[in-house]
Image (cartoon, rainbow, N blue to C red):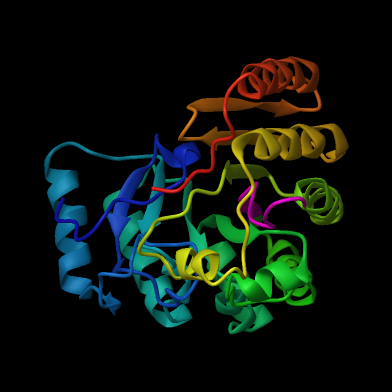
Amino acid sequence: MEYEGQICRTPMERGAFMLPVSVGCSYNQCYFCMLFKHLRYRELPLEQIEGELQRVQRAGGNPERVFLGDGNAFHLSTERLLRILELVHRYFPACTGVNMDATVESILSKGDGELRALARAGVRHLYLGIESGLDDVLRLMHKDHTLAQAYEAIGRLQAAGMVYDAHMMTGIAGQGRGEENARAIAAFYNRTHPGRIVNFSLFIHRQSPLYRLVEEGRFRPADETENLREERLLLELLETPVEYDGFHDVIPFRVRGNLPGQREKMLRQLSAAIAVQETKAPLVAVV
């Protein structure tokens, strides 16, 4: 597979075949993200996409799940996505679902009929970077949506027959606001019912726009102990059944499982991680 840039997909798609359909991210303005800043966004030619499908087919591949890359594949026009989906099913007849990253704006830009057509053509899961349950945090991080817009987009994609999965970041609200954000994002999830939640605890790249906010005093990062406490409160408050996977790369620590069934086990893991972290000097994830 020819791939330009860093491979970016949720760990819940590790068993899916990744098919690049674009390079970079169509939005690429979130202040915390450095994955695509060095890339010029562009759509890949259909001939190149079909060639990759043909290569895998010749090698004997016939995956059941396909993940479309890169940063926001759902930004592609409905016509183009339907053409890609037709090619996927032509070369991979065993495929039962095609998943991809999306933004709130990319969903709202499509009509209800377009969303239904994409669901009928095999789109199953859309991963949305919700990040926070607080509107002022979304504004500060230069996200492309408000909470009201997120509610609208999620309601429309679910009505069309697709599943919404969430990306979020503990620590995104900054120092002293972990509990506030946990309560806000838990309320959001309990109302919107994601199928999966992937939590990448915030780390700040020194070349990111967010680091400039730190230098200007406009953002004070939380340390990892606060981030762990925020995550623990979130798991206490989540009422909707959900598959959860949470990362803290700089500690390192990871907690994952299904709620509500594995809640107590996950809370014990978090309590143990908090107890360990409390014995150490405060650690802020700046890289």
Q: Residue at x 80, y 75 (%)?
A: 148
Q: Is residue 182 something one can see in this rendering?
A: yes
Above/below status of 56 relative to 242 = below
Q: Position of residue 143 (x, y in %)?
A: 59, 73
Q: Main secondary structure of the magenta part?
A: loop
- Is residue 189 found left or right of 67 in the rendered image? right
Side of 77 where 116 appears, left or right: right
Q: Nearer the viewer, residue 280 or 146?
A: 280
Q: Which residue is rendered at x = 46% and y = 76% of the image? A: 29
Q: Quadrant of residue 48?
A: bottom left
* Start-end of magenta stretch: 164-176
Residue 156 seen anywhere in this rendered image of the structure: no
Residue 81 position within the rendered picture, expressed as x and y whole percent measured from the top left: 41, 72
* Image position of 261 with respect to 68: above or below: above
Residue 128: which quarter of the image? bottom right
Q: Is residue 275 above or below residue 17?
A: above
Estimate the x, y position of residue 34 in percent, counting from the top left: 37, 62
The foreground one among 212 and 237 is 212
The quadrant where residue 172 appears: bottom right
Q: How many marks?
A: 0
Residue 85 locus on image (x, y percent) = 39, 64
